[in-house]
Image (spheres, rainbow, N blue to C red):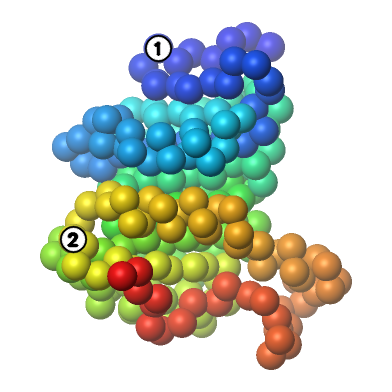
Amino acid sequence: MPDIDFSDTLALIPKEDKPNLLFVLLHGESAGPEQLYPLVEALKKAFPLALLILPPVGDESRLDELAAFVRKVQGHYGVSGEQTALAGFSQGARMALETSRRHADLAGRVLAFSGLYQEMPGALPETTMIHFFHGAADQLLPLSEVETLLQRLGEIQADVTVDVASQVGHELHPALIEQAIVRLQTCVPLRSWKEAYGELGAGSRGENDASSEPSSEPPTLH
């Protein structure tokens, strides 16, 4: 298989062993990959065998191109969609969310920092777990919009977690990055619980299910 062209993409590839995870990181508008360096460092420390790539970010018209590139990287390194996470800040978060919505099985997780869907989703792939991280003092994307989205995601039984940092604005804050690592290391996707109980696709939930169905009041990090 030919090598991947990383000429316009920052790629951090494990030198000793084959990658066991893939993180695709998308920066916000009017910014560059350096915006995501704090997240890169946290991911490298927590997941030393992960492959991290920071492709150039265009706009929503290039979501299919982004998905095709991710699939090419997955095939080249033998990484599955379940082993892949899309992460982004602001516009990058929106692109990560919309790409995963359009392309089922592309990524097992999405980390959305200070970003929401371009439009309210009617349904989401149950193969993807979504983690939202938001600042309570975000003026560009008010918390009220997050709460409205949460209500909708609850209605469609999406696999979602939401964390809010108090006194944090529209920024990739260390508290949110730290919580993202916690979510990656501790959250079991809802599909795994359904598979364990033979309920995948049944649409039923018992009151004791360990699901991540969002609450209308997101937890706050202090």
| Image: 104 above or below 56 | below
Label 1's element?
Answer: loop
First of labels 2, 1 by sequence position: 1
For label 2, the residue is 169
Q: Quick one: 14 or 209, which is closer to the camera?
A: 14
Res. 21 in view: yes
Query: CA gap, disc 2 to disc 1?
Result: 34 Å
In the image: residue 215, left or right of residue 126: left
Question: Along the horizontal axis of the image, is 141 left or right of 158?
Answer: left
For residue 111, above or below residue 9: below
Q: Name the residue: 40% across, 84% down.
A: 216
Give the amino acid type for the residue marked by disc 2 in the picture.
Gly
Residue 130 screen position, x and y as percent: 50, 60
Which image quadrant for residue 193?
A: bottom right
Please name whichever residue, 215 or 157, is drawn nearer the observer in this view of the structure.
215
Residue 78, image x, y percentages? 71, 27
The percent position of residue 54, horizontal first and vertical second, equals: 40, 29
Q: Could you classify mark 2 by the number of other residues whose Cα lies within 10 Å: few (under 14), some (14-19), or many (20 or more)?
A: some
Task: Give the residue furthest to the right.
Answer: 198
Looking at the picture, does residue 133 appear above or below residue 12?
Answer: below
Residue 94: percent from left, percent from top: 35, 52
Question: What residue is at 52 percent from the left and 58 percent from the top?
Answer: 183
Q: Residue at x 19, y 67 (%)?
A: 167
Q: Secondary structure at mark 2?
A: loop
Residue under label 1: 7
Specify the quadrant of the image occupied by residue 176.
bottom left
